[in-house]
Amino acid sequence: MNFNYYLPVNVVFGCGKVKEAGEIAKKYGKKALIVTGRSSAKKSGLYDRVNDSLKAAGMESALFDKVAQNPLTTTAEEGAEFAKENGCDVVIAIGGGSIMDCAKAIAFLSVNEGDINDYIFNRKQSDQALPLILIPTTCGTGSEGNGFAVLTNPENGDKKSLRCNAIIAKASIVDPECMMTMPKKVLASVGFDALCHSMEAYTSKISQPFTDALALYAMERIADSLVDLYNGSEDMEKWESITIASTIGGMVINQAGVTLAHGMEHPASGLKDIVHGNGLAALTPVIVEASWKGNEAKFARISKILGGSSAADCAAQIRSLLEKIDLAVTLSDLGLAEEDVPWMAENCMKVSAASVANNPVVFTQEEIAEIYRKAM
Amino acid sequence: MNFNYYLPVNVVFGCGKVKEAGEIAKKYGKKALIVTGRSSAKKSGLYDRVNDSLKAAGMESALFDKVAQNPLTTTAEEGAEFAKENGCDVVIAIGGGSIMDCAKAIAFLSVNEGDINDYIFNRKQSDQALPLILIPTTCGTGSEGNGFAVLTNPENGDKKSLRCNAIIAKASIVDPECMMTMPKKVLASVGFDALCHSMEAYTSKISQPFTDALALYAMERIADSLVDLYNGSEDMEKWESITIASTIGGMVINQAGVTLAHGMEHPASGLKDIVHGNGLAALTPVIVEASWKGNEAKFARISKILGGSSAADCAAQIRSLLEKIDLAVTLSDLGLAEEDVPWMAENCMKVSAASVANNPVVFTQEEIAEIYRKAM
């Protein structure tokens, strides 16, 4: 067993912690670029609370509110131009995974020249970026816990992540209260994404003791909270559970990577702009059915956490969970069709080579195409 | 639930990783101060292997080999003078907890002026130190995973830790092969210390999700390996288990602290220079008997990991483990006597105030004196 473990995340966790944003951010700069989506951070009042906190700490700010789901490399480029024009020296994201990922790419492009696709495909490297403060408003992506930013290239549909330690947040303000305004449908989708992060990191061929320990803990927390919260529970401990489990999910994939479900979902959502967690819901049970024999001990442990008894019934346990959160969907339900399979299978080998290799069973392009068909 | 989690450890783990010391160290400096004990790193050949690796990487080195068990503040001062005289710009420790802790203090004093006791008792602060590379040769202290350095003041016997992020290693080279030359008696003592770190962090009043997740994992690993290794097993997976569990033990106490066993052991070994793990072995069962009602759920989980069934039998499980590794000792066996109790109880309140406060049941000085008597 050989591994490296280095993940200098700085998690500031607790209800109401958002009000410390200004005091935290002023350690890193004088003028913040605040990155949000088009409306929800304004509607919920969170944008105002963060901005007031910055003002109280003597900081200036500029707002970039153009980030949409499955953020584009071109939006990040536009944001970086905006940050430079406005003289921003720190980037603060308020939002879900799309917004945090776009903010990371903006922080990166603000100090690095050239085409971002060169950095995404490792043709160029840099360990510099503007300092980042991340404030997640969904408990799924875990972007606040890692150095990944998933972006889609609008020219060719490639959805792939920029990965470097420079885009690990200087501080992630993880406030369970920020999650409580999520619509039920969003909670189901992001909560399942969080579960997938820990399941995939735990079964990844490059898993290691630190990621195993954290992933096991996070899966237990999600198993204990997601369905109840979906059914309307307001139990604060359960909100804390799913929130910290989501951040942990982001951390474990930074070290252990994701496996085939994420690897196969990226081509699907790169092609059709579908909701990431829904794509995972369509693919994961089919992939686990095809993969559990690759690591029976670990799939058995997951199955037990979800209420099952053995590796062989792990996929069934996942399906049962998905039914309870009304997320038992197929790729056809999400707008994909048989004729999309060849492109997706080919694109998967291109953008997700590492995830394909991390899976407990390594499949060929033809086998991956067959899994897409079974998930239709 | 509110907490911060920030621990930028950089663990390089694996058999034979020691040979990468030079390549790793040269990122941080040109001339290394190598800190060792009087003889064992030389006898085992490890000093030569590290030094050869430094030479191959084009680095110079100077050797400071004067560190003894329970290192003194005065030895650290002497080491820092030696580092300055020799123009060293990076510090490499090869050894157990005493040596790593002394090296941390040397790295700290090499760039900070004044009396180290002022920093230990928080009358002064600094976030600067020479970069540190730690190579543990025992699996107990976990010093390679945290920003603590426990030192003893020879003037008054105070044994207390310097704590700051500047003395977290830039890289910890954790090589299970380095552990395999430990004498059986040392393995028992340091392995129990490692278990105590995780038990104490897990039951600490300032435990948090990250420390819980890691401590649970580490306790399982130790329960699964320590007795077999003590009995002569050469199973490499078990050596890897106890080695990583020890590093994790160091990490979790950085965030969650230790509790009463460590808090009460420091006065004992500060007074009589006893082996730290042996002092813990004498104290822990008595303290757990007095403390388990303070957190029944967590002591029950520990008990189950050790083969028991409930919080009430946790102390018995620990005693049973200690018998299996021939470490069922009393404070009297270690050379302490009834007349030492008043000084130890008073000193415990002075040097271990935080550990006393972290314990699931908070005891008065009189109650702590009574626990010392029961452990005689």
Image (cartoon, coloured by chain):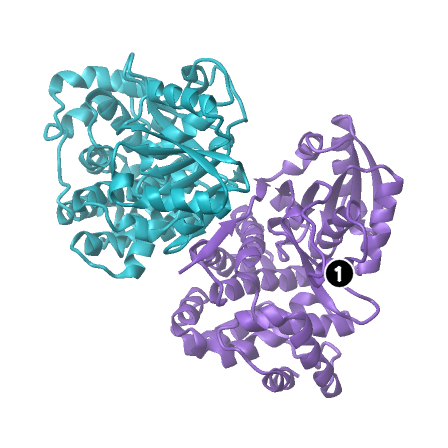
Chain colours: A purple, B cyan
**Residue B220 visible at all:** no
- The quarter of the picture where the C terminus of chain A appears is bottom right
Query: Residue A334 appears at what percent x and percent y?
Result: 72, 76
Query: Is A44 or B331 nearer to us in this picture?
Result: B331
> Disc 1 designates what residue?
A118
Find residue A186 and report its image quarter: bottom right
Find residue B92 and report its image quarter: top left
Find residue B330 and report its image quarter: top left
Kindly identify the residue that appears in the image at 42 percent across and 73 percent down: A295
* Left or right, B228 with reference to B6: left
As drawn, the residue found furthest toward the right would be A85
Q: Amino acid at mark 1?
A: Asp
- The quarter of the picture where the N terminus of chain A appears is bottom left
Label 1 SS: helix
- In the rendered structure, the residue with mark 1 lies on which chain? A
Query: Is B205 or B214 nearer to us in this picture?
Result: B214
**Residue B141 visible at all:** yes
